[in-house]
């Protein structure tokens, strides 16, 4: 069985053929970039009792929640995969850290992982990830603006930010939907606070016109991956 669950903001729980992956855990903090958080996460760190991999796209506090990651690693022994500017902040054993840079490709715990570019000048080391196992693949863009090399990205599911504050907005996401070779697009990094408020019905209508199926997930929603 493979599924994808939206935890809120840019956080996801993804099971690929038995391997459990978490990306950009942001569960406890009450603010987003100094602005009040309007939508809470679906779970808390204490709810996670199994995790194989934790992927983190960059060092900003709405993607790297230090205390949460440390709690989950202590509870589960998960391997944290992230750029250097993330790993240096985490107080976890070295054997639970794997440093990556854009261009890396490898297999760990049965999951194929490709580390891809993200355009986010506000970060010291932004990346995105393509993860694949059991014939299913997911692209998590991290925080990024639209960029030309998105034509090179292929995945079944594309998770892209649309909030518009230091990331793509809805209009840039339309363009990205034409460029990424994917079957489904799931928006993220929106409506968590006033600074990232967006119109989802408009997004869905425009994306679907590009022959890519949009999937609008509420926080806590879980879908089976086809």
Image (cartoon, rainbow, N blue to C red):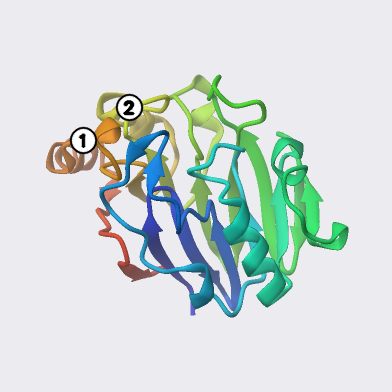
- Residue 2 lies left or right of residue 18; in this view the side is left
Q: Is residue 26 above or below residue 208?
A: below
**Residue at left 52%, top 56%?**
25
Q: Residue 222: image x %, image y %?
A: 34, 70
Q: Residue 113: image x %, image y %?
A: 68, 52
Q: Residue 92: image x %, image y %?
A: 78, 59
Nearer-N-terminus badge (1/2): 2
Front residue of 25/222: it is 25
Q: Which mark is residue 61?
A: none
**Residue at left 40%, top 61%?**
7
Q: Which mark is residue 164?
A: 2
Quarter of the figure that contains the C terminus: bottom left
Q: Secondary structure at mark 2?
A: loop
Q: Which mark is residue 198?
A: 1
Q: Is residue 101 above or below residue 155?
A: above
**Circle 1/circle 2 CB separation < 8 Å:** yes
Front residue of 20/110: it is 20
Crowd band around label 1 with a 10 angstrom C-alpha radius: few (<14), some (14–19), many (20+): some
Front residue of 159/177: it is 159
Q: Secondary structure at mark 1?
A: loop
Crowd band around label 2 with a 10 angstrom C-alpha radius: few (<14), some (14–19), many (20+): many
């Amino acid at each position: 069985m493979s599924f994808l669950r939206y935890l809120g903001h840019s956080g996801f729980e993804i099971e690929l053929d038995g391997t459990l992956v978490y990306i950009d855990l942001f569960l406890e903090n009450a603010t987003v970039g100094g602005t009040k958080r309007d939508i809470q996460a679906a779970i808390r760190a204490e709810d996670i009792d199994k995790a194989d991999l934790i992927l983190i796209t960059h060092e900003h506090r709405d993607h790297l929640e230090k205390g949460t990651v440390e709690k989950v690693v202590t509870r589960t022994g998960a391997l944290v995969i992230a750029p250097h500017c993330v790993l240096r902040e985490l107080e976890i054993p070295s054997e639970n850290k794997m440093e990556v840079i854009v261009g890396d490709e490898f297999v760990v715990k049965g999951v194929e992982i490709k580390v891809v570019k993200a355009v986010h000048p506000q970060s010291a080391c932004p990346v995105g990830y393509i993860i694949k196992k059991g014939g299913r693949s997911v692209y998590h863009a991290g925080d990024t603006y639209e960029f030309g090399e998105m034509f090179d990205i292929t995945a079944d599911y594309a998770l892209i930010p649309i909030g518009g504050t230091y990331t793509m907005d809805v209009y840039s996401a339309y363009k990205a939907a034409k460029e990424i070779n994917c079957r489904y697009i799931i928006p993220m990094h929106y409506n968590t606070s006033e600074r990232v408020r967006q119109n989802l019905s408009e997004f869905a209508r425009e994306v679907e016109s590009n022959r890519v199926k949009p999937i609008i997930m509420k926080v806590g929603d879980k879908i089976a991956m086809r």
